[in-house]
Amino acid sequence: MRTRRGICYTGIDNMCYQKRKTDGNFAGAPMITNRKRLKSSSRLPVVVHSGQCDFLDTLPNDIVLCILAKLGSTAGCAADFFGVLSTCKRLNGLGLHSLVLSRLSTNCFAVKAKNWSESSHRFLKGCSDAGNPEASYTLGMITFYCLQNRGSGASFMAKAAIRSHAPALYSLAVIQFNGSGGSKNDKDLRAGVALCARSAFLGHIDALRELGHCLQDGYGVSKNVAEGRRLLIQANTRELAAVFSTTPSLFSGKRQKWNLVGSGCPLLSDFGCNVPAPESHPANRFLGEWFSEKPPSPELRLCSHGGCGRPETRKHEFRRCSVCGDVNYCSRACQALDWKLRHKTTCREAVDVNGGEINGNMNENNIIEMVVES
């Protein structure tokens, strides 16, 4: 009984004849055409009515998944990735596979604060569940600081930190240093130093700088000025190398003129060389945009470093400048970056307007000391 071709069922055979017809392609293989997509039983490219071949149907799903995963990992923005998914139903379905979501680049999660919605939350959550550390970190920062769900946000960042995500490790270190989300007694300096050391080992420049200041000041670790200074120099050389790698034009052309301030090595940013401001992580940019539109309560302050965006979770959580008292920082790394980018020219009592000399209470790295409010 040949039921597959519908010989025994005349009604069905007539119905199928209206929807399907047999033809031959240029290779002589049988071809089945319908209203949705042309398919070839021999897995050869099918000639459509326009004369072109639909090669996508000949690719197995695993190869398409590898292509989409490579595209997502190198996408410059979210539109580059989602534009491909909107091409057809097959790409839309395969693009949401866990293999693809787990390899999406950081730029795919650069959502604007004004565009935040429940669908954005679901997409980040799906990528996090697929094992993408960037999605876990971004969602953790948004949940912890913007949505004020401290436990869930910290768990997302911890999920990324388990996968050796350096920014997540550093953010957890900042939370431990400040006792964010809790009281002043919830500070754990040793845990903060350990997280900073792990993040610095993975190449995070701010963590390396923070660890150097901790060693210099004996903050949460035994004081070792020489080792701390070595880490600070290493952080600045890495920062300068990152600038050169992203801006090759600095190598070409005429000899560069460095703007020097005070004494010190002219090749290191914290010791005299003014390099361009490092690009902020999309999560930090989201925090800055969110709190510019929805400022926190008046008694809570934002970190004064423009590339950070972190707010206080309790009153007087951040440290302030001991000279002017007008700026607040969540970490020594943010304070060092903001000092060389902006605050060294605006500190109220540190700069002598007549001669431009710095007269404030400075440490050996030409940075104003900070005090912790009680």
Image (tube, rainbow, N blue to C red):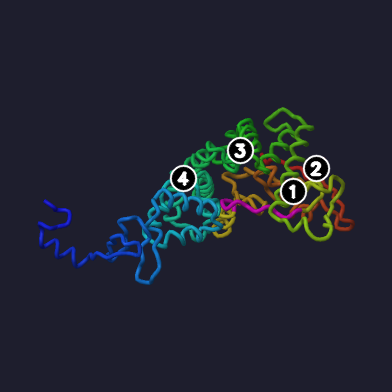
Is disc 3 placed on a helix, strand or loop? helix
* Bounds of the magenta segment: 275-284
Q: Of circles 4 and 3, which is in front?
A: 4
Q: Residue at x 67, y 31 (%)?
A: 220
User: Which residue corresponds to mark 1?
Assistant: 240
Query: Quick check: 250 above or below 218?
Result: below
CA separation, marks 4 and 3?
Answer: 21 Å
Q: Amino acid at mark 4?
A: Ser
Task: Answer with left or right where residue 88 lies relative to residue 250.
Answer: left
Q: Which residue is mark 4?
A: 128
Which residue is outermost to the top?
222
Disc on the earlier residue, 1 or 4: 4
* Mark positioned earlier in the residue sequence (2 or 3): 3
For marks 3 and 1, give the CA distance: 24 Å
Amino acid at circle 3? Ala
| Eye-nearest disc, 2 or 4 | 4
Q: CA distance from mark 1 to mark 4?
A: 32 Å
Residue 73 drawn at (x, y percent): 53, 51
Q: Along the polypeptide, which appears first: circle 3 or circle 1?
A: 3
Quadrant assignment for the C terminus: top right
Residue nearest the observer in this picture, 172 or 68: 68
Q: Earlier in the sequence, mark 2 or mark 4?
A: 4
Distance between mark 2 and mark 3 Cα atoms: 23 Å
Is 6 situated left or right of 294 in this image? left
Q: Are marks 1 and 4 in contact (CB under 8 Å)?
A: no
Q: CA distance from mark 2 to mark 4?
A: 40 Å
Measured from the top left, where is residue 27 in percent x and y?
35, 61
Q: Look at mark 2 in the image and give the residue it sits on.
A: 365
Q: For the stretch drawn in magenta, what is the main secondary structure? A: loop
- Position of 324 compared to 119: left or right? right
Mark number, residue 173: 3
**Residue displayed at 30% across by 56% down:** 41
